[in-house]
Amino acid sequence: MTQIVQPDSLVTLHYRMALADDEELMTTFGGSPATLKLGSGELAPALERCLAGLPVGERRVFELDAGQAFGAHNPQLLERVPLSAFPADVLPAEMSMIEFSGPDGAKYAGLVRQVRDGAAMVDFNHPLAGKAIRFEVEVIGVL
């Protein structure tokens, strides 16, 4: 009986993620496969939905538009942060990721887009927000 990926499966697979123009972002093909627990946040929900229902041995390519993948880029998630608000040991540099703590203690990563006039423009969107994604998977096993 062929095993099928379920929304809460522990799955061993090879995957490749690329932009729509096929610029590769990451891949496990040619190396060790990944083992992921679906539903645990290890993989974006949109990518998990692609896997659900696939049988072991299946190799598929999914084309996801920006809305399906990591969402549209939200300009409201760009925030101007005064340099004085950063801890003394943190020097924001353009195109660096910085982790922030929210009022509830949750951690948020932000990409510093620009540093100018005593402030950093920090983008709290997912780095792939607004981008179409090509997601290729080969299901090796379901545990």
Image (cartoon, helix red, strand yellow):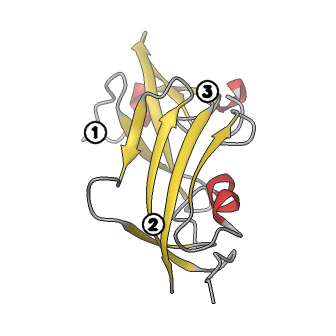
State the SS at label 3. strand
Q: Which residue is mark 1?
A: 88
Q: Is residue 30 left or right of residue 114?
A: left
Query: Could you say which quadrant of the image residue 71 lies in?
Result: top right
3D distance between C-alphas at marks 1 and 3: 22 Å
Give the camera-side residue of 64 and 104: 64
Amino acid type, mark 1: Ala
Query: Could you say which quadrant of the image residue 31 lies in?
Result: bottom left
Residue 77: where, in percent of width, then height? 65, 32
Give the mark toward the camera: 1 or 2.
2
Q: Which residue is mark 3?
A: 78
Give the mark toward the camera: 1 or 3.
3
Quadrant of the image containing the N terminus? bottom right
Q: Residue at x 45, y 54 (%)?
A: 15
Residue 34: where, in percent of width, then height? 39, 66
Residue 141: where, in percent of width, then height? 48, 78
Amino acid type, mark 2: Leu
Which disc, if any, is residue 13? 2
Q: Residues within 10 Å of mark 2 (few under 14, many from 20)?
A: many
Farthest residue, direction front: 1
